[in-house]
Image (cartoon, rainbow, N blue to C red):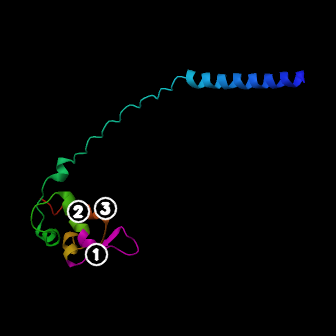
Amino acid sequence: MATKKAAKGAKVKSVKKTAAKKAVKKTAKPAKKVAKKPAKKKAAKRTPSAAFMKAMKPSDALSAIVGAKPLPRTEITKKLWDYIKKNKLQDSVNRRNINADANLMKVFGGKKQVSMFEMTKLVNKHLS
């Protein structure tokens, strides 16, 4: 019996010691410091190039499509694409090509079909 009591007493003491150690560990740990991330710099708003934003007067042929008042090149391109999409002039097989109607044929120099990259070059000839 003496050994059983000693064994029980040892278990109780060891349980108390481990509980005390855990309590000490929990309270003794310093809180981890979280390193602050450097603040992100706000990206400066992109300012458009002055050359693109300069109002250009369209020629008579181009004004039939985009209007007669002076507009920046970007707005003229937007209105031109609106016209192309509205009249379904984009080629159905090769979407890079634009099929010209009567108004666009004047702008494109008589060409029936023009690529979208060539279109901007041809339109620039009609701006002053």
Residue at point 21%, 66% (across, down):
79
> Amino acid under label 1?
Lys
The residue tagged 3 is 117
Whole-percent x and y of residue 73?
Answer: 19, 58
Whole-percent x and y of residue 50?
Answer: 17, 48
Write down the region rendered in magenta.
82-102
Q: Is residue 71 above or below residue 28?
A: below
Cα distance in 3D space between marks 3 and 2: 12 Å
Disc 3 is placed on an element classified as helix
Q: Is residue 27 above or below residue 60?
A: above
The residue tagged 2 is 77
- Tell me the quarter of the image containing the N terminus: top right
Whole-percent x and y of residue 119?
Answer: 27, 65
The residue tagged 1 is 112
- Asked if residue 128 lies left or right of residue 95, the reply is left
Disc 2 is placed on an element classified as helix
**Is residue 97 inside the magenta stretch?**
yes
**Is residue 35 inside the magenta stretch?**
no
Disc 1 is placed on an element classified as loop
